[in-house]
Amino acid sequence: MIIKKSPDEVDKIAAAGDVLVRTLRLLESKIRPGVTTGELDRAAEAFIRSQRAEPAFKGYRGFPGSICSSPNSMVVHGIPGRYALQRGDILTVDVGVVLDGWVADAARTFAVGPVSPVASRLLEVTEASLFAGLDQCRAGNRLGDVSHAIQQLVEDGGMSVVRSLVGHGIGRDMHEDPQIPNFGPAARGPVLEEGMVLAVEPMVTAGRPAVRMGDDGWAIYSQDGSLAAHFEFTIAITAEGPRVCTPWHEPDRASRRRDVYAAAPSGGTR
């Protein structure tokens, strides 16, 4: 059953999303060669708890980390630990935050210094596919419109959608109905309605779509060893269109204030 949320409840999910976005920005500032994924995990947990929130992943079905950190050919669910980032790596960071009982979920794949042309193209295509899906998150569309838009952009870009991993509804629980594939025909599936909140998350490889489970029972890798990327938003369906509750793509408020101040004429109000 798809659980619709009231505008007030969407605001609460967005408040969790604000903590999440600030966590991702903190981690982005720390991602560089030599830093371990365990160090990133500890920084994320400390920050999230400082905001009177909780890391949604910590202990979820036994997961030991506060974030998922997945380098290179690892698609998702990487356990943070001793792995030290290297120049040329790509690293997916997936974060979940619980604030006042409401959950937000988002992911980004970061370049660790200059990366190969294949890696750069993979990040570009995967991120663009998320925005293609976002554009279809409108009341009256069908869920298949989201899935199809993602698949079309990925495959037109020469990459492959991972078909065995999906997005999901979100709210009080991290994983709610519906499941959201990143492929399939348009105009199929449930009608999108105001109040639905979706975690849309294309997972893409630079090679073939098949994946394999790692020895730890958590990490999932591309089967052919090709690079993988993952971008995710928590998105609410509203009467005004899609609302991104985890807007990591937007400038932070401090940056926006600096931009406004810089643009103000001499003697303008500050």
Image (cartoon, helix red, strand yellow):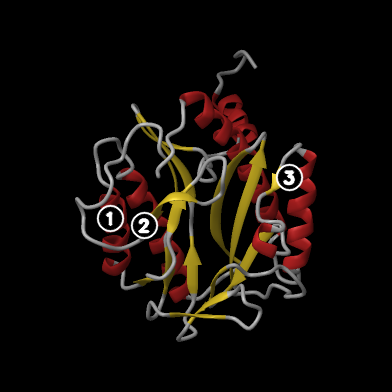
Q: Nearer the viewer, residue 33 or 178?
A: 178
Residue 50: x percent and y percent? 79, 40
> What residue is disc 2 on?
129
Amino acid type assigned to the residue bearing label 2 in the image = Ser
| Quadrant hosting residue 153 | bottom left
Q: Earlier in the sequence, mark 3 or mark 1?
A: 3
In the rendered image, the quadrant that contains the N terminus is: top left
In the rendered image, the quadrant that contains the C terminus is: top right
Residue 214: x percent and y percent? 59, 81
Residue at (44, 41) in percent of width and height: 235
**Mark carried by residue 87:** none
The vertical placement of 239 against 219, above or below, is: above
Residue at (62, 31) in percent of width and height: 258
Evaluate if marks 2 and 1 touch, with contact meaning CB atoms under 8 Å apart. Answer: yes
Provide the secondary structure element on which disc 3 rests: helix
Residue 200 seen in render? no
Relative to residue 46, is residue 155 drawn left or right? left
> What residue is disc 1 on?
149
